[in-house]
Amino acid sequence: MAGRGEFDLIADLFAPLAAGYSGALNLRDDAALVDLPAGHRLVITTDALVAGVHFLPDDPPDLVARKAVRVNLSDVAAMGARPVGLLVAACFPRDGGTAWVELFAAGLAADVAEFGVPVIGGDTVATPGPATITVTALGQVATGAELRRDAAREGDVLMVSGTIGDGALGLAVQRGRCAGLEPALRDALIDRYRLPQPRVTLGAALSGVARACLDVSDGLLGDLGHICRASGLGAEVEADAVPLSAAARAAVAADESLLRSAVLCGGDDYELLFTVPPDRVAEAEAAARQAGVTVTAIGAMVAGEGVAVRYAGGPPEAAGDGASWRHF
């Protein structure tokens, strides 16, 4: 990146992404100012993406940027909040060249426009190690209307947005698995891995309707376990009810082991998993239609602890401790 220093990069590539947000101070200060309407709370979440761990080193830089944004917007959505702004701390490889950074900034710009959420601060540094992108997302939600993991109740219906398993299957495709799939189906899975769809509109619409909520980042069953532990309950999932895309169905038809591994435990879906009182399921479905998203009932919260799965109507099987991705 010879010839372009940190402040040149900020002024040229990132300050335009703060346009229209006065509290960002045109990214010329070391902090931003955020105003909240009366009766609202600030939601804050942060995620780091590391080359070779969360994305492949040869993934397109613009898609790396957009994924970094979207996994954070997904966490904001899971609390029923509306996104307000983004902080981006980017550690760019010292020998990566300016072109990589320019494409990365273009990806940021695309999602700033798509989701209407400005970049209001952050940092840019050079690193001798792999690219590491940390995004912090700020959101706002009416006080008391937050969707949390500890609010599920026995008898709640378990629901999930969109389809499950595409992200993990997309990574599997990139690593050489699922070779028998048609090219169009392989491309669809890779796209879902590289460019998740945060359910921002749905999350806000579920505030006041759903009880507990999170986004599926580390695996459906493992993430459901977080709701169980936080709420002091168990959960039962009907495997046959978990919604699959056409590409995922084709992959599972060719290799049934992918249902238990990639689909139920693989992660990278960034769909919303939430619990709803039985008498409000129709309301949740209506909210989803309004948001242009499908939602599917896949099970229920039950007394006890842990997650159990029924396969093809059989007896419940404990999901176990290996039901999600773990860094350590």
Image (cartoon, rainbow, N blue to C red):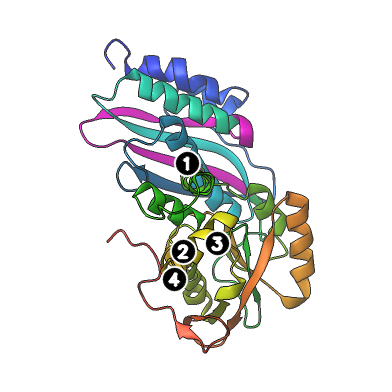
Q: Are marks 4 and 1 in contact (CB under 8 Å)?
A: no
Q: Position of residue 201 (x, y in %)?
A: 68, 48
Q: The residue under label 1 is which amino acid type? A: Lys
- Start-end of magenta stretch: 113-140
Predominant SS along the magenta part: strand
Image quarter hosting the N terminus: top left
Q: Position of residue 238 (x, y in %)?
A: 58, 77
Tell me the distance, in whole angstroms, between the alpha carbons under discs 3 and 2: 9 Å
The mark that comes first in sequence, 3 or 2, is 3
Would you name the residue on which mark 4 appears? 260
Would you name the residue on which mark 1 appears? 67
Q: Nearer the viewer, mark 4 or mark 1?
A: 4
Q: Residue at x 61, y 66 (%)?
A: 274
Q: The residue under label 4 is which amino acid type? A: Arg
Q: Residues within 10 Å of mark 1 (few under 14, many from 20)?
A: many
Q: Are marks 3 and 1 in contact (CB under 8 Å)?
A: no
Q: Position of residue 56 (x, y in %)?
A: 34, 42
Q: Residues within 10 Å of mark 3 (few under 14, many from 20)?
A: some
Q: Is residue 189 magenta?
A: no
Tell me the distance, in whole angstroms, between the alpha carbons under discs 4 and 1: 25 Å
Q: Residue at x 22, y 36 (%)?
A: 129
Tell me the distance, in whole angstroms, between the alpha carbons under discs 3 and 1: 24 Å
Q: Residue at x 39, y 40 (%)?
A: 134
Would you name the residue on which mark 3 appears? 249
- Return the mark for residue 254: 2
Image quarter hosting the C terminus: bottom left
